[in-house]
Amino acid sequence: MKLSDWKSKGVYLTFNEHQIFTVDEGSGEFLLLIHGFPTASWDWSKMWPGLIEDYRVLTLDMLGFGFSDKPRNHSYSIAEQADCIEHFLAEKGIDNIHLLCHDYGDTVAQELLARYQTKSFTRHSSLILESICFLNGGLFPETHQPLLIQKILMSPLGFLVGRLFNRAKLKKNFNQIFGPYTQPSEEELTTFWTLISANGGRYVFHLLIRYMQERKDNRERWVGALEKAEIPLRLIDGVYDPISGQNMVDRYREIIPQPDVVELKDIGHFPLVEAPKCVLEHYTSFRSKR
């Protein structure tokens, strides 16, 4: 799906005086897709046609990402992103939701799960989480292996790195984390870069990356939410991923009671882009088990 076609599907939601790009299509049970860092909801576009055949699918570009506003000098946080999602669902009048998440979106889902378990939603007190399916992401900070660029962005020089980042550097980094046979096309790289750089995105890179420290600070809350989960969970993971591949899968099996895990061989950090049909098949089988 071309980026222009994807953008034409969306409408904007106002959240804390910021404009948030959202998409809502299909019919059936409600399914919310939560994207990762540093891209946007377009990441789901290859899976979108198959998903909307069975579900009413909603997604958004979180604050600081994609077509949404990217305020500078803003204290971005996982909690605020969770607030935004609560607000989005409340505005839609949706009380029951399934989640399918990737990367940064995994962490947002963990925060939503913790709120659900402690009855501490801030914008939508009647929200019920029905199930969560995770794709590659840093569910456990002790197994997360950030790229060098991510480490530098976390440093005091991060603001400079963000401003100097460009499409060529994006290609170099993405080639490291995609699978050996599923490398991103030039068109996909251009689309990723367009989304990242839109609305002055390079100026907030170093602010968004602070979620990596948040994962450490909130490990007990977010990992504890997974350990105590009473709703269905599944992990679909591209194990070739150097960031959150086999090492994260192994830890998931150690920590999570009765782990439901699907390993995708030779697939990297972006299974939703690299192997969308495969992910759709495994997600559909997860839902059919309920």
Image (tube, rainbow, N blue to C red):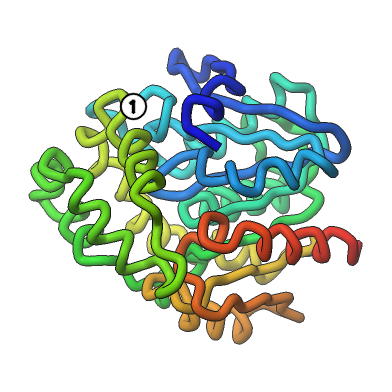
Quadrant of the image occupied by residue 250: bottom right
Q: Is residue 247 above or below residue 145?
A: below
Q: Is residue 16 above or below residue 162?
A: above
Give the image location of residue 22, x and y in percent. Answer: 58, 26
Q: Is residue 161 above or below residue 253?
A: above
Q: Is the C terminus in the top left, top right, bottom left or bottom right quadrant?
A: bottom right
Q: Residue at x 9, y 43 (%)?
A: 160
Give the image location of residue 174, x and y in percent. Answer: 32, 59
Q: Residue at x 31, y 28 (%)?
A: 198
Give the image location of residue 101, x and y in percent. Answer: 60, 52
Q: Residues within 10 Å of mark 1 (few under 14, many from 20)?
A: many
* Left or right of residue 110: residue 79: left
Q: Which residue is mark 1?
A: 70
Is 196 or 97 nearer to us in this picture? 196
Q: Residue at x 43, y 17 (%)?
A: 18
Give the image location of residue 15, x and y in percent. Answer: 51, 19
Type of residue at label 1? Lys
* Left or right of residue 14: residue 258: right
Q: Residue at x 86, y 40 (%)?
A: 29
At numbered mark 1, what does the secondary structure look like: helix, strand or loop?
A: loop
Is 119 or 53 nearer to us in this picture? 53
